[in-house]
Every structure is written in structure tokens, then in C-alpha cells.
Image (cartoon, rainbow, N blue to C red):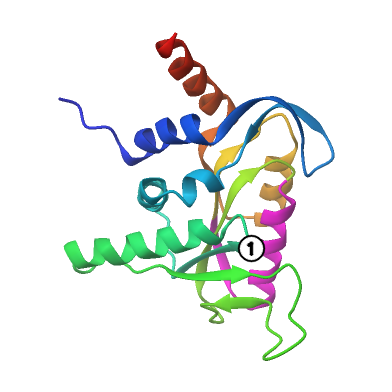
Amino acid sequence: MTTLTHAQQLLTLLARISFRLGQFKLSSGGTSDYYVDCRTTTLHAEGGRLTGEAILDLLMENGIAADAVGGLTMGADPIVSNVATASAWRAVSHPGEPLLHGFLVRKAEKAHGTGRRIEGFCREGARVVIVDDVCTTGASTINAIEAAREAGMTVAAVVCIVEREEANGRPAVEAAAKDAPFLRLFSANQVRAEHVRQFESLS
């Protein structure tokens, strides 16, 4: 019996509970005949676990070493928590495996307390992975990249769960990321194809 990878299991769940066909207005101002709400998957008990494991697998496959993972609130929030927790579980079962701590980037500095824009892990010189749920224009990802660098951290890689290939998000993110690779778990077309396959199998 073939065991499905974490990414394959995540794709099945993502296509079932996060993908919708119809007419939708995007945050970029454009319209689309589909919508992917990754949060219904990343906040799902099993979906969250698979998200953390699949991203760790992706980083390992690409030889990405980092100290922490973070992104812009709120799409990145459950991703960051799930990846950090998955890294801790791996370290328990495989002593010596690296821990990835988490941080969240506010959309604006808070006007009280410490006034910080980054919450959680923040260490000058640290290598970090920036994560996001869906990449369309790449604006939120770029925002997080800039905040991490302003805090003195080095961006080791950028990861999104779903890339909408019809927009110019990838070129914009790659320009902002400079030498750091931009990785994705799935393209929107892959999620659509799996969604249609599941629908047809029920017909």
C-alpha cells in the first residue's frame, strides 16, 4: 500500500474544504471564477498538522536551514504555529532536528506597549522563512519580507501554500526576496484539478 505524502494528503483536504468555484472579488481588486480560503484548512485540526509537516518537508527537500518561520497576520498565523509545532514534534522523535520558532508581523506597529511590529521570535542575524497562505499579488508576503529585514533578520526562503499563477505575484516576491528562493506547495490549478476530481468521483 502506497503511503501518501503530507503534501498529497494536504492537497486532498485543501481541495475539499478550501476551494470554491463561482464569481469572487479578490483583495487585489480583480475578480476570479474560483476562491481558495486556506484558513479553513490551516485552522482545521488535521489540516493544520499536515500544513506544518508539508512545509517542513518542502524546506528539507530544498536544503533550507532556518531559525524561525513567520509571516504577515492573519493569513500566516496558523501556518506559523503549525510549522513551529511540527518542528518541535520532529525534534522529540528525531533528536538533533532543528527547531523553527515562530513570529508574526503586524500590518502596522502597535501604538502601545513595546510598539513592536514583530511579535514572537526576533533576533538580529537569524535566518527566517517567510510564509503565506495564498500568493496573488504578493503584497502581504513582501510586507513580511521587508519587516523581517528591517528587524535585522535574513530571509532564507519564502513559502506559500497556493500560488495563483494568473497574477504577477511570483515576479514581485522574487524581486523582493532577492537571493532567497520562492517555493510553493501547490499551484491553484493543482487545487482546482483535485477539487474537480473529487466532485466527479461523487457524481
The outermost residue toward the right is 29
In the rendered image, which quarter is residue 100 located in? Answer: bottom left
Disc 1 target residue: 73
Q: Is residue 196 above or below residue 85?
A: above
Disc 1 element: loop
Query: What is the crowding at mark 1: few (fewer than 14 residues within 10 Å), some, or many (at least 20)?
Result: some
Residue at the spot x=74%, y=46% of the render? Answer: 172
Provide residue 35's location: percent of width, then percent of height.
65, 33
The outermost residue toward the left is 1
Q: Is residue 114 above or below residue 96?
A: below
Quarter containing the N terminus:
top left
The outermost residue toward the top is 203
Quarter containing the C terminus:
top left
Tell me which segment is drawn in magenta: 138-157
Residue 136: tell me if it is visible: yes
Residue at the spot x=21%, y=32% of the render? Answer: 3
The outermost residue toward the front is 203
* Front-lying residue, 83 or 196: 196
Residue 94: tell me if it is visible: no
Residue 167 within the magenta-colored segment of the rendering: no
Residue at the spot x=25%, y=61% of the render? Answer: 90
Provide residue 163's location: percent of width, then percent of height.
61, 37
Q: Main secondary structure of the magenta part?
A: helix
* Front-lying residue, 45 or 58: 45
In the rendered image, which quarter is residue 87 located in? Answer: bottom left
Residue at the spot x=40%, y=38% of the render? Answer: 10
